[in-house]
């Protein structure tokens, strides 16, 4: 005891049984002791309180491929796609509540954590069959529906971003915790947050309309959510003590297959993470580039970034004490270097101050901002019209001054002239003040029926469709049938600006309409 304090400092204080002894910091050994102490506490206070057999039994039951599972998936998919077509968030939320997809996805995570090969196989089978049925059922509804317009609800699910990834991550943590701790009521909120069914419904929409951009974008969003939830559930399960001791003894082949599944799931998720991280990093650099020409008192009021457009588009509104006439050129050069290609940049400067000059500049800036808003709206309209027509946005002609947007639609199998006119009407209904012109392929024209000298109800509808198609395709139409009726139809179409060729044949029946050949 001669060294006094030194001897006491080196001593280890004993604690009563069952309590974590106080730890003194003595380098690496003491740090390991702290970690081991916390691990011991976690095993005793948390892991030991979980009924792992009961949790696994519940998860296995939710992974079964039952008639109830398939019925609820089909109903959820149907509600989701109708909500998306109607652009109704309330209906889409109803589909989220019904969807049982969380069951097999969480089951896959727990199966990976426990190394249970049979469970992995069952979860994957239920998930694959359920996903396929959902997509095909949604595609069938879209094919039978007259509504095939890309609504805002559909467009918002065609490109995953970093926020979608974090939503899936936090939801998976909450869902796995609720399942492990027996708080199943939380799963309702998790189902809404992860929103697994709406992206699948959008995949079905893209398949039905043969729209590759919508199809692959929504599929990537669904796959990103799925992988994130499965991985997070596996990690949570291992933290709570679920391990291979709870499974049957595995062969080396099973272990290799399980490892292969992990790698197969990790590769696409990793690629998605890389792309999302790159987009986030580019956006941060763009934020700095926009502010670079201005003083420290300048602020960004609005920043819209679309890095995946052709070309990429950036729209920014900056609040600044001093307007910089050369700011646009400087920001344009910086942003082009960041992205590595020419960017479509819109920069609006809004002066802040109380002077008369500032007021005049503010008025000018507001006018510029309105111009930028009109330009952005026209670009968005071009994108939506391109998605509907199945072509690239470069194929859409937009006249902002006259507010006219025109595009030639790509031929779609089974689509009639009526379907193309309905698509045009749907886009036009969401664009008040704009004239939408969708040029359809030269599909067969309907017959125009008469009752004596009076158009029948079907004949009136057919005449309206023939007139619309004639104005859009701008090819002469040959009319055949009774002479008197042909003359009446020709007069009606000429009033609409449609070129016609009258070829009456004197035979009784409806007036026939056909596109003229190039040599006619």
Image: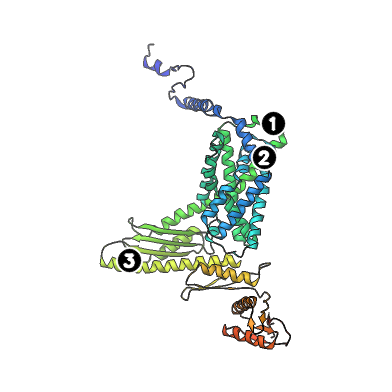
Q: Residue at x 62, y 51 (%)?
A: 75
Tell me, for residue 189, which label it has, or none.
none
Horizontal relation, residue 360 to residue 274: left or right? left
Under tag 3, what secondary structure?
helix
The answer to which of marks 1 and 2 sits earlier in the sequence is 2
Find residue 510 and report its image quarter: bottom right
Q: CA distance from mark 1 to mark 3?
A: 73 Å
Quadrant where the C terminus lies?
A: bottom right
Counting from the top left corner in percent of width and height, residue 484 is at 66, 88
Q: Is residue 67 above or below residue 370?
A: above
The answer to which of marks 2 and 3 sits earlier in the sequence is 2
Counting from the top left corner in percent of width and height, residue 304 is at 45, 59
Q: CA distance from mark 2 to mark 3?
A: 62 Å
Tell me, for residue 248, which label it has, or none.
1
Name the residue carrying label 3: 362
> 297 or 81, which lies in front?
81
Under tag 1, what secondary structure?
loop
Under tag 2, what secondary structure?
helix
């Amino acid at each position: 005891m001669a060294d006094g304090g030194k001897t006491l400092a080196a001593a280890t204080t004993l604690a009563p049984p069952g309590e974590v002894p106080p730890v003194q910091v003595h380098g690496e050994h003491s740090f390991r002791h702290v970690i081991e102490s916390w691990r011991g506490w976690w095993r005793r206070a948390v892991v030991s309180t979980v009924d792992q057999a009961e949790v696994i039994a519940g998860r296995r039951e939710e992974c079964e491929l039952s008639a109830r599972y398939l019925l609820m998936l089909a109903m959820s998919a149907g509600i989701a796609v109708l909500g998306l077509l109607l652009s109704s968030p309330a209906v889409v939320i109803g589909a989220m509540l019904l969807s049982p997809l969380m069951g097999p996805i969480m089951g896959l995570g727990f199966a990976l954590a426990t190394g249970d090969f049979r469970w992995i196989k069952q979860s994957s089978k239920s998930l694959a069959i359920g996903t396929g049925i959902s997509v095909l059922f949604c595609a069938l509804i879209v094919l039978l529906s007259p509504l095939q317009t890309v609504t805002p609800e559909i467009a918002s699910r065609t490109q995953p971003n970093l926020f979608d990834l974090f939503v899936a991550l936090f939801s998976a943590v909450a869902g796995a915790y609720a399942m492990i701790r027996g708080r199943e009521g939380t799963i309702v909120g998790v189902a809404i947050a992860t929103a697994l069914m709406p992206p699948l419904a959008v995949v079905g929409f893209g398949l039905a309309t043969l729209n590759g951009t919508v199809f692959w974008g929504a599929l990537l969003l669904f796959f990103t959510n799925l992988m994130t939830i499965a991985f997070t559930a596996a990690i949570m399960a291992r933290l709570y003590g679920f391990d291979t001791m709870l499974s049957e003894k595995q062969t080396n082949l099973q272990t290799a297959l399980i490892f292969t599944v992990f790698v197969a799931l990790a590769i696409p998720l990793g690629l998605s993470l890389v792309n999302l991280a790159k987009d986030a990093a580019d956006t941060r650099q763009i934020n700095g580039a926009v502010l670079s020409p201005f003083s420290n008192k300048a602020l960004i009021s609005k920043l819209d970034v679309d890095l995946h457009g052709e070309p990429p588009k950036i729209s920014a509104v900056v609040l600044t004490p001093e307007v910089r006439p050369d700011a646009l050129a400087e920001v344009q050069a910086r942003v082009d270097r960041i992205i590595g290609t020419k960017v479509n940049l819109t920069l609006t400067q809004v002066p802040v101050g109380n002077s008369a000059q500032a007021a005049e500049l503010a008025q000018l800036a507001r006018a510029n901002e309105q111009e930028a808003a009109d330009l952005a709206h026209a670009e968005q309209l071009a994108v939506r019209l391109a998605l509907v027509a199945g072509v690239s946005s470069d194929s859409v002609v937009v006249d902002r001054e006259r507010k006219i947007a025109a595009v030639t639609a790509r031929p779609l199998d089974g689509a009639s002239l009526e379907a193309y006119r309905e698509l045009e009407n749907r886009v036009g209904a969401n664009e008040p003040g704009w004239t939408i012109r969708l040029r359809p392929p030269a599909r067969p024209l309907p017959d125009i029926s008469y009752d004596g000298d009076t158009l029948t109800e079907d004949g009136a509808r057919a005449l309206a469709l023939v007139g619309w198609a004639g104005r859009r395709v701008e090819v002469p139409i040959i009319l055949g049938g009774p002479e008197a009726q042909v003359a009446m139809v020709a007069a009606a179409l000429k009033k609409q600006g449609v070129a016609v060729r009258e070829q009456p044949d004197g035979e009784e029946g409806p007036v026939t309409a056909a596109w003229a050949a190039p040599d006619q």
